Image (spheres, grey):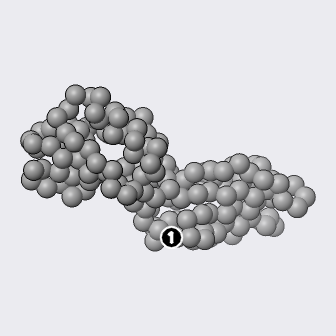
Amino acid sequence: MPSFDIVSKTDFQEIDNALQNVIREIATRYDFKGSHCTIERKDQEITINADDELKLKQMHELLQGHLSRRGVEAGILDYKDPEKAAGQSVRQKVAIREGIDKDLAKRIVKDLKGSNLKVQVAIQGDELRVTGKKRDDLQAAIQFVKGLPIEQPLQFENFRD
């Protein structure tokens, strides 16, 4: 029976490369001269320290630009609320999403079952397995899931006949 998997994987090496490029650009840009802006990654969380809200916004734009140049979608970033640090400086945590959480998986399964496509969907940990009798049904399921309003980037792999 033909099947494929819906996954959400993140390439942490590309994220590290993008962060190094952001750090290098912050060190050379004139508007960041003399500022104490830093960005670092620890496991699945990025910490951004900026002097003020304006520099924080500029660092967001730099990060998203460098991630897109490295081929990483910006949808993997989950920005938390900025918190005040010493003086006017701000700190913000950014979680890196990997895998499909249960709520999103249930929503995708519900939408696929409600679409009247002849496929079965099973949740397997942090990924989904979609099976069907015909290859055309699976391709229609892929197009249907691509059309859903999901901000998290999804990949389709292990397409088997």
As drawn, is 137 to the left or to the right of 107? left
Q: Nearer the viewer, residue 161 or 69?
A: 161
Dot 1 crowding, Cα within 10 Å, few <14, some 14–19, many 20+: some
As drawn, is 117 to the left or to the right of 149? left
Q: Is residue 53 above or below residue 139?
A: below
Residue sitting at the far right: 87
Q: Nearer the viewer, residue 116 or 146?
A: 116
Q: Is residue 9 above or below residue 120?
A: below
* Residue 53 appears anywhere in the view: yes
* Residue 7 appears anywhere in the view: no
Would you identify the image quadrant in which residue 139 lies?
A: top left
The amino acid on which the numbered mark 1 sits, given as a three-letter code, is Asn
Q: Give the percent coordinates (x, y) of residue 106.
A: 40, 41
Residue under the image location 46 percent in, 44 percent down? 103
Residue under the image location 41 percent in, 49 percent down? 153
Q: Is residue 136 above or below residue 14?
A: above
In the picture of the structure, the residue carrying the numbered disc 1 is 17
Residue under the image location 57 percent in, 51 percent down? 78
Q: Is residue 118 above or below residue 28?
A: above
Q: Give the percent coordinates (x, y) of residue 51.
A: 80, 58
As drawn, is 72 to the left or to the right of 49? left
Question: For the residue labelled by badge 1, is the local secondary structure a helix, a strand or a loop?
Answer: helix
Residue under the image location 64 percent in, 69 percent down? 40
Q: Give the percent coordinates (x, y) of residue 93.
A: 67, 58
Q: Give the percent coordinates (x, y) of residue 95.
A: 58, 57
